[in-house]
Amino acid sequence: MRIELATEPGDPRRPNEDFASVAIPASGQGGVLVLLDGVTPPTGDDGCLHSVPWFTARLGGALGELSGSRRDMGLREVLSSAIARTAETHRQTCDLSHPRTPQATVVLARWDEERIEHLVLSDSALLVESTDGTVRAVLDPRLGALPPQVQQARAAVRALPEGTPERAAAAREYVAAVEALRNAEGGFFTAAADPAVAERAVCGTWPREGVRAVAALTDGATRWVEKFGAGDWTACFALLRERGGAQELIDRVRKLETADPEGRSAPRGKRHDDAAAVFVEF
């Protein structure tokens, strides 16, 4: 088995809010992959005394422990229990009802000799390579299917000149419209303090014998495909398969971001974002 993991903050002056881990039991049979992308509050106000990295470390640790030790639990149940456990650690000190209480996207993969289970919530990605070389992307489609008025607001922002007051005002309206859809019906969902969100996750199972490798990417790494169009998911997987490929993918994203600092060719909310990539070849 080959495992590669790379992660890098979008800004070296700020803590990395991504979390990534792979655990293999002492028996050597099976394993667990956990990937989280912490959500940065737009104003810094989230009603919590703790940082986003504090939250992702605790949620990620709970997900890894429960996924590995509780094989009798499905991945939705694992996510629900991990959210509840994490919420209890700061319920007495923080306002967990705040709409921007610390939260994260989630990718889980768990395997044994017979099957590979997966769970995806929000806009991180899981790539699965079959033994015939076919690469499939497991994605949560909700962020890409926001209501027409929100998509129109985004287009309006991109149509205005960079650095103008008009663009700044339009951007604030767009962000407010997106935030109103966070963890709401008709919108999209992230792992915060409500265990019930686990039911919104995209889940499935693959026969173990039909899978050659898997990879998990936060949206800072998926930019290579989704923002810059440097290749499709199959090309992305081929890059990850190269030695040092997880770090190489992030390095290539950074080069593309640096070449387009104002986001003219590839509009995006941040010039650079935290990025994480995990590759597991069975």
Image (cartoon, grey):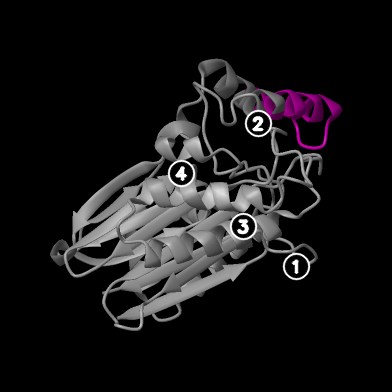
Which numbered mark, 4 or 1, is in the foreground of this view?
4
Q: Which residue is mark 3?
A: 56
Of callouts 1 and 3, the N-terminal one: 1
Which range of residues does the magenta coloring cover?
Answer: 156-175
Which numbered mark, 1 or 2, is in the foreground of this view?
1
Q: Which residue is mark 2?
A: 158
Which residue appears farthest toward the top when viewing the image?
Answer: 149
Which numbered mark, 2 or 3, is in the foreground of this view?
3
134 in magenta:
no
Q: Which residue is located at x 51 percent, y 32 percent?
A: 188
Question: Three-letter amino acid code at disc 3?
Answer: Thr
Q: Is residue 53 above or below residue 213?
A: above
Q: Which mark is residue 78?
A: none
How far apart are the two marked residues, 4 and 1, measured between alpha carbons? 27 Å
Question: Three-letter amino acid code at disc 4?
Answer: Leu
Q: Would you call the spot at circle 1 few (<14 residues within 10 Å), some (14-19), or many (20 or more)?
A: few
Question: Three-letter amino acid code at disc 2?
Answer: Arg
Q: Which residue is located at x 61 percent, y 53 percent?
A: 86
Q: Is residue 236 left or right of residue 48?
A: left
Of callouts 4 and 3, the N-terminal one: 3
165 in magenta:
yes
Which numbered mark, 1 or 3, is in the foreground of this view?
3
Of callouts 1 and 2, the N-terminal one: 1
Circles 2 and 4: CB atoms closer than 8 Å: no
Q: Which residue is located at x 44 percent, y 71 percent?
A: 22
How far apart are the two marked residues, 4 and 3, measured between alpha carbons? 14 Å
User: In the image, residue 47 lies at what x, y percent?
Assistant: 79, 40
Of callouts 2 and 3, the N-terminal one: 3
Q: Which residue is mark 4?
A: 121
